[in-house]
Amino acid sequence: MRPTKIAEGIYSVGVIDWNIRDFHGYSTDRGSSYNAFLIIDEKIALIDTVKKEFADQLIKNICDIIDPKKIDYLISNHTEMDHSGSLPPVMRAIGENKPLYCSKMGLKNIQRHFPQKWNFHAVENGEELCLGNKTLQFIETKMLHWPDSMFSYLKEDKILFSSDAFGQHYAGYEIFNDQVGEAIMPHAKKYFANILLLYAPRILKLVDQIAELGLKFEMICPDHGVLWRNNPSEIIDAYVKWSRQEGEKKAVVVYDTMWHSTETMAEAISSSIAEEGVAACPINIRNSHRSDIVTAVLDAKAVIVGSPTLNNGLFPTVSDFLTYMKGLKPQNKIAAAFGSYGWSGEAVDLINKEFESMKLEILDPGLKIQYVPDNEAMDACFQFGKKIAKAVSR
Ligand code: FEO
């Protein structure tokens, strides 16, 4: 992608990663981008770099606008390697002695990634850097996404450089949200569900803090995906809604199956929930990526998980999903377990243990069916579904 002017004196100089399909375990079906921004004033600042494989593209993009040696400051909002991987070649290009601004945790974390003794400047929360007519203000945003994360806010232009927050793994030639339209929201939602959900309480506090500071936004520029130019409050409102996890009238029925018995149960339970006017859909884990399933779980009131018992334990795909979901700390969910078994039947109890450790509301001890569901077992599945629907609707 060629550099693009996004406001007077401000350029997007990042790169598109068209081919990435797995971002540390998250399926990125539409690729991604690593955004970086050049601010040209009396002094010149570069905000963030890109994954190391794309360093040459970033430097070429900068060269299309200015000689990199003219850059006075490099601002690192976040140490994760998709944004810091190109620091060594970029620092060589701009001059190894140029000040590298980062948070205090950023200083520690960059030093744990790179041996170079750069000219670090660890900022205080709220500290400002005057570039001439434009002023950058740094805002600590610990755990959005790492302990080192911070925002950089360009006060006069009211532009927020938000690092990972408000991003989307979306590769495209569109620069701004209005060029994609509402179709960008599912990408933003999936990104939130998989990257930021576990920090939801911090996000709500941060939104309050931003309101207290009276910050206004003409544009929000994340480090992934499109920039929020049209109605940037839309994505902030969406983050507040997703962080509250109030849950819609919806149940996600996730399962795997050995000989179709647990699948038969899943379909009967899901159908029974839907008959009661609650949105429901059975999802076979083997046909859906875990990152898409947790996106479906994000705004559901209930998560129902089914597993056959295999070798006295859970089916491996179900363990994988539960481990992944547990790490993301979903809250305010009703949960229930089900599954078929042959002779021991531990799976349902093991799912419940995972639900307990996630502090979800376990609706029922769970439904176990031996071998193949008969008419009586199918009736039990329908009753199980009705109980779930009633709980979701209360
Ligand atoms: Fe886009 Fe936490 O890195």
Image (cartoon, rainbow, N blue to C red):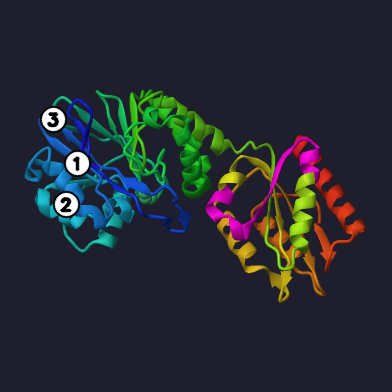
- Residue 363 visible in the current orientation: no
Q: Quadrant of the rendered structure where residue 278 is? A: top right
| Residue 274 image offset from top left, x and y in percent | 76, 40
Residue located beneath label 1 in the image: 46
Query: What kind of residue is marked 1?
Result: Leu
| Precedes in sequence: disc 1 or disc 3 | 3
Q: Are marks 1 and 3 in contact (CB under 8 Å)?
A: no
Magenta stretch encompasses residue 359: no
Crowd band around label 2 with a 10 angstrom C-alpha radius: few (<14), some (14–19), many (20+): many
Question: Which residues fall within the magenta stretch?
Answer: 272-294
Q: Quadrant of residue 46?
A: top left
Q: Residue at x 88, y 58 (%)?
A: 377
Name the residue carrying label 3.
41
Q: Which residue is mark 2?
A: 90
Placement of 79 over or under 220, stated as above or below: below
Q: Nearer the viewer, residue 110 or 303?
A: 303
Is 137 rendered above or below residue 334? Answer: above
SS class, disc 3: loop
